[in-house]
């Protein structure tokens, strides 16, 4: 009782948070696992069917298509969204004029603030074959035939990867810049004393010193690749669906549109397990815990 | 930094120029689309459909905005978005701060258990429980209500940890002396911590504000009554579904672009004032995960 008297107010403060998490995080998790083993109907009996849902998902060619798309698009985003911000951060770091640096950082960050509806809407228009700027340039400057980028399955995955990189690079760049700023300046002084050029300072001081930040960014990006949804939902169309529909899209279609909740829940659990597995692998690979 | 200016060899100069041009080119890929959108939104309907590069309004007109506002009734989804964003953000910040405050007590019994309880929720991607979440909302009769959108992400481990790290900067001795003076936890929380961690409040508020304004997955899943659409969902129907193979009605480009401008206005308006909080939040957030 003494405990409650002393800390009662604090526990009371936690009550709404804990209640929320139980109802909207833990219960759905358990419920999802249960549903994945049921023949789930919105009304009536929901008999347990063992692994039948998992079996159905694993034998669904659309699932494997979604898996391949997720890995290709997610992998591409992982790679490009790592390299592009790194290059930009290094490049920004070499800029000597503070106002230019600040302005660049501010402008590059803007797309991150916008929703995928807006970013998608803008780029669908920019890439449109009859009035988009990109095709205008192709036609008038390079004298090429216009390309219907978003209806061409050859370009579809690239568009997903590049747009995601474009949207998020300013954001990730901030993480790298912060890493660069925290490097001990005496390391650069020592390097300069030894006659290191700008390039040598970059490869022998900046990059090695930045490795911890790189690990963090890589881990954060890895967690994101299986969650790609908004972007695909907005930019997809029937022509390119088979090249861009990712796992979350598959789940959405199965669960919300076709109301096959059992298989949808089973597919979600593959995503969950894959996310955890990927995280562990990346943690191990980058030896994140030793940082 | 000053000695970096001294190296003025031509190679360095050439590098600086190329480097500057590279960054400028990147910035242009961000700026041109927005200028294009803005210019088209102020063009007349016919001019906006003509295939040419538009960086300045052609046949200046407010027609796009008028149609979006009057004929397409964008004010209703706009209102829905404002309600969900404001109510959701206030509650989110309040609940996250409360929990963040609890976690600064070093010797609180059960703290480890509660912290683990919160951390686990951060490991489970929201998307992976999409289907059961839909069922939960359905069972609670929240489908097609704005409450479902307010409740979605009402609190998050991320915000809790962010608030906690701001609260940890408040000297602990201060709250101890306040306690000796007879102040209760709620009072200390409200009058001392929330005020002294104003930067933290601003950071979390802005993150949540932007996140909720842009929220898309939840409204797509939980709402199918068009009177309850939020701005993002209404925009999707307006600018994307009509752009490729329009079936029902014709929406001219200037109308679609006006919709985009209206939806990003609140974000662009607050951005310059709050940039520093964003930076701080991003950095703290990344070091937490």
Image (cartoon, coloured by chain):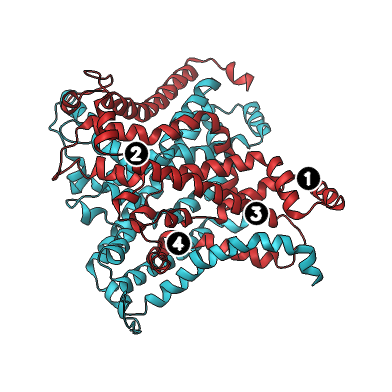
> Can residue A126 be seen from the camera position used here?
no
Say the numbered circle drawn on residue B171. 1
Say the numbered circle drawn on residue B75. 2
- What whole-number distance in Å separates the C-alpha atoms at marks 1 and 3? 17 Å
Q: Is residue A258 above or below residue A131?
A: below
| Callout 4–callout 3 Cβ contact below 8 Å | no
From the viewer's perspective, is B111 left or right of A33? Answer: right
Label 1 crowd bin: few (<14), some (14–19), many (20+), radius 10 Å: few
Determine the secondary structure under disc 1: loop
Q: Mark 1 and mark 2, same subunit? A: yes
Residue pointed to by mark 3: B98
Residue sitting at 56 percent across and 53 percent down? B158
The quadrant where residue B47 appears: top left
Determine the secondary structure under disc 3: helix
Label 2 crowd bin: few (<14), some (14–19), many (20+), radius 10 Å: few
State the image coordinates of residue A63 (x, y, percent, origin top left). Answer: 27, 66
Residue sitting at 76 percent across and 58 percent down? B106
Residue pointed to by mark 4: A278
Determine the secondary structure under disc 2: helix
Q: Chain of mark 3?
A: B
Colour representing chain A = cyan
Q: Which chain is rendered red in the image? A: B
Label 3 crowd bin: few (<14), some (14–19), many (20+), radius 10 Å: many
| Callout 1–callout 2 Cβ contact below 8 Å | no
Residue sitting at 75 percent across and 54 percent down? B185
Q: Nearer the viewer, mark 1 or mark 3?
A: 3
Q: Mark 2 and mark 4, same subunit? A: no
The quadrant where residue A266 appears: bottom left
Residue sitting at 54 percent across and 67 percent down? A22
């Amino acid at each position: 009782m003494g405990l409650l008297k002393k800390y009662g107010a604090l526990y009371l403060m936690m009550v709404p948070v804990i209640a929320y998490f139980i109802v909207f995080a833990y219960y759905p998790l358990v419920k999802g696992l249960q549903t994945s083993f049921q023949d789930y109907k919105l009304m009536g009996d929901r008999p347990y069917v063992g692994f039948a849902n998992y079996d159905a998902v694993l034998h669904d060619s659309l699932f494997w298509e979604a898996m391949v798309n997720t890995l290709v698009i997610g992998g591409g985003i992982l790679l490009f969204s790592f390299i592009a911000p790194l290059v930009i951060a290094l490049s920004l770091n070499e800029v000597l004029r503070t106002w230019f640096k600040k302005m660049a950082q501010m402008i590059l960050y803007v797309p991150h603030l916008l929703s995928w509806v807006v970013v998608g809407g803008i780029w669908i228009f920019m890439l449109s074959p009859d009035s988009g700027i990109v095709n205008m340039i192709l036609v008038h400057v390079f004298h090429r035939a216009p390309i219907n980028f978003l209806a061409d399955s050859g370009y579809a995955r690239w568009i997903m990867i590049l747009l995601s990189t474009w949207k998020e690079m300013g954001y990730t760049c901030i993480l790298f810049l912060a890493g660069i700023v925290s490097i001990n300046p005496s390391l650069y002084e020592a390097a300069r004393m030894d006659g290191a050029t700008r390039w040598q300072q970059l490869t022998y001081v900046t990059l090695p010193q930045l490795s911890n930040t790189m690990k963090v960014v890589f881990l954060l990006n890895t967690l994101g690749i299986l969650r790609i949804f908004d972007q695909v939902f907005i930019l997809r169309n029937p022509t390119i669906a088979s090249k861009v529909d990712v796992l979350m899209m598959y789940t959405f279609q199965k669960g919300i549109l076709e109301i096959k909740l059992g298989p949808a829940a089973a597919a979600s659990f593959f995503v969950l397990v894959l996310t955890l597995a990927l995280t562990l692998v990346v943690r191990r690979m980058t030896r994140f815990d030793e940082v | 930094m000053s000695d970096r200016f001294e190296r003025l060899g031509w190679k360095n100069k050439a590098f600086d120029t190329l480097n500057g041009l590279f960054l400028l080119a990147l910035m242009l890929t961000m700026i041109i689309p927005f200028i294009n959108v803005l210019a088209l939104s102020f063009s007349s309907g016919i001019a906006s459909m003509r295939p040419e590069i538009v960086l300045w309004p052609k046949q200046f007109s407010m027609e796009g905005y008028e149609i979006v506002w009057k004929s397409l009734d964008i004010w209703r989804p706009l209102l829905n978005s404002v309600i969900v964003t404001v109510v959701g953000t206030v509650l989110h910040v309040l609940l996250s701060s409360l929990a963040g405050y609890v976690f600064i007590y070093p010797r609180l019994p059960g703290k480890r258990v509660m912290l683990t309880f919160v951390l686990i929720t951060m490991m489970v991607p929201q998307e992976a429980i999409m289907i059961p979440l839909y069922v939960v909302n359905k069972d609670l009769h929240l489908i097609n209500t704005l409450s479902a959108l307010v409740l979605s992400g009402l609190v998050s481990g991320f915000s809790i940890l962010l608030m906690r790290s701001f609260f940890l900067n408040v000297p602990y001795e201060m709250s101890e002396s306040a306690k000796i003076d007879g102040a209760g936890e709620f009072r200390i929380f409200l009058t001392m911590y929330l005020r002294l961690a104003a930067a933290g409040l601003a950071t979390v508020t802005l993150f949540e504000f932007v996140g909720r304004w842009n929220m898309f997955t939840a409204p797509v899943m939980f709402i199918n009554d068009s009177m309850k659409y939020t701005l993002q969902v209404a925009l999707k129907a307006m600018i994307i579904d009509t752009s490729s193979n329009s079936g029902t009605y014709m929406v001219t480009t200037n109308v679609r672009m006006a919709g985009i401008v209206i939806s990003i206005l609140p974000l662009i308006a607050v951005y310059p004032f709050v940039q520093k909080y964003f930076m701080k939040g991003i950095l703290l957030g990344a070091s937490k995960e």
